[in-house]
Image (cartoon, rainbow, N blue to C red):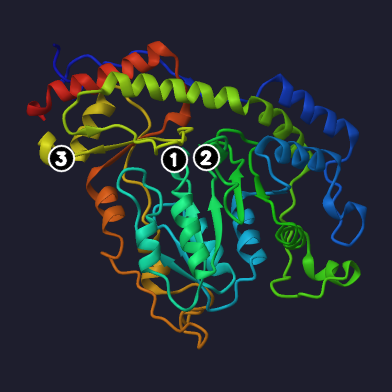
Amino acid sequence: MTSLAIHGGPKAVTRTFKRANPIGKEEVEAATQVIQSGTLSQFLGSWGPDFYGGPKVQEFERACESYFGVRHAVSVNSWTSGLIAAVGALGIEPGDEVIVTPWTMCASATAILHWNAIPVFADIEPDTFCIDPASVEANISSRTRAIMSVDIFGQSADMDALRRIAERHDLKIISDSAQAPSARYHGRPAGTLAHIGGFSLNYHKHIHTGEGGILVTNDDHLADRMHLIRNHAEAVVGAKGVTDLSNMVGYNFRLGEIEAAMGIEQLKKLAGIVACRRESARRLTEGLEGLRGLRTPVVRSRCDHVFYMYPMVVDTAVVGVGRGRIIEALEAEGVVGLTAGYVLTHLLPMYQERIAFGSRGFPWTSDLCTRDAKYDRGICPVAEELHESSYLGYEICLHELDSDDCAELVAAFRKVWAHLDAL
């Protein structure tokens, strides 16, 4: 076999992979029709028919309700907005605690802080990278009010275990399923087994409208509160007759008509996009089988995976080479989209310095915060070890991979593994 590209040999990947782009003529036509209509938004921040937005927003929401099998879908202008609305809708009070995973984009935890509540970080499962129910249970205190699970990389957290914990301790659950639309947990759509769930419509997700998000719930009351938080709640509650004013601080989290029209078309393509992504993942897993010290994605029993990421773990003790050096070698072979580690939210400066609102440590220094929440290195050892040493991700979402593309990716991995001693 030829020498590694990092040592001057030829690259294993010779093809230019097609960039993933699910936007087609359907979305162009849908957006054009909205522009020609002149109605780019039809929201008003007052109680009346337009409080719920224009025709495309409402059509998109009804389509999502049908697709995900829920009573209510509430569109928002970003998934970050959706998480803020979800936490607020639950009635979270200042000083309350919400347990969340550190292995997630920072918005999951920041949405908790937004309501002056305290994020408490639980560790993750070493095989699925989702929040570990045992760690959740260990972190519950008298101030815990909710759990935010994250269906990371494209498969659901262990919702049966989390629901049992929530029922025992009278907690609410939010499913941050940003990366997992169309994944299923024991036959049910991910994101729909919590009190509130939802999905991102950001540009690199399975379906996208540029920016946006969809909240889903089967609870009429929670849906009503999310609608209010989305659209200037404080200006609406009087005329609407709302008497529970807790967290009725409203925002402009409203999705536009163009994005909604595109979302309608994108939703029609979701099943096909997911099927292609799963097929690419299957080819990679079959091709990488048997490489010593490399663990390919683990899919939870009775669940499926929609592969926003293709997550792997490298046992460096078995391989005998550090993860960083392996990535250098793979990138030299032409592999694009590798990630060393993911995110450790609890180690961000905000949590290490406890500086959020103002400069004096609020909300942690508030009298309402009754526990010294820990953000020290070591509180989430599984997540920390994976991030620092062994997790190896491939951004499978970047490209539309065909069988030849997958074959070249596999060839690159196998070439590097055949030359591990040379590294």
Q: How far apart are marks 1 and 3 (CA)?
A: 22 Å
**Circles 1 and 3 in contact, beta carbons < 8 Å:** no
Badge 1 local density, few (<14 within 10 Å), some, or many (20+)?
A: many
Residue position for label 1: 153
**Circles 2 and 3 in contact, beta carbons < 8 Å:** no
Q: Earlier in the sequence, mark 1 or mark 3?
A: 1
Q: Which residue is drawn at 44% across and 52% down?
A: 104
Reply above or below: 321 against 117. Answer: above
**Circles 1 and 2 in contact, beta carbons < 8 Å:** yes
Q: Where is residue 78 in the image (x, y as percent from the top left)?
A: 63, 49
Residue position for label 2: 180
Q: Label 2 is placed on what type of residue?
A: Ala
Q: What element carries label 2?
A: loop
Q: Residue at x 48, y 82 (%)?
A: 369
- Pick the front one: 232 or 238: 238
Q: How many marks?
A: 3
Furthest-bottom residue in this view: 367
Q: Which of marks 2 and 3 is nearer the N terminus?
A: 2
Badge 3 local density, few (<14 within 10 Å), some, or many (20+)?
A: some
Q: What element carries label 1?
A: helix
Q: How far apart are marks 2 and 3 (CA)?
A: 29 Å
Q: Residue at x 58, y 37 (%)?
A: 203
Reply above or below: 233 against 17. Answer: below
Q: Label 3 is placed on what type of residue?
A: Thr
Task: Determine if residue 126 is in view.
Answer: yes
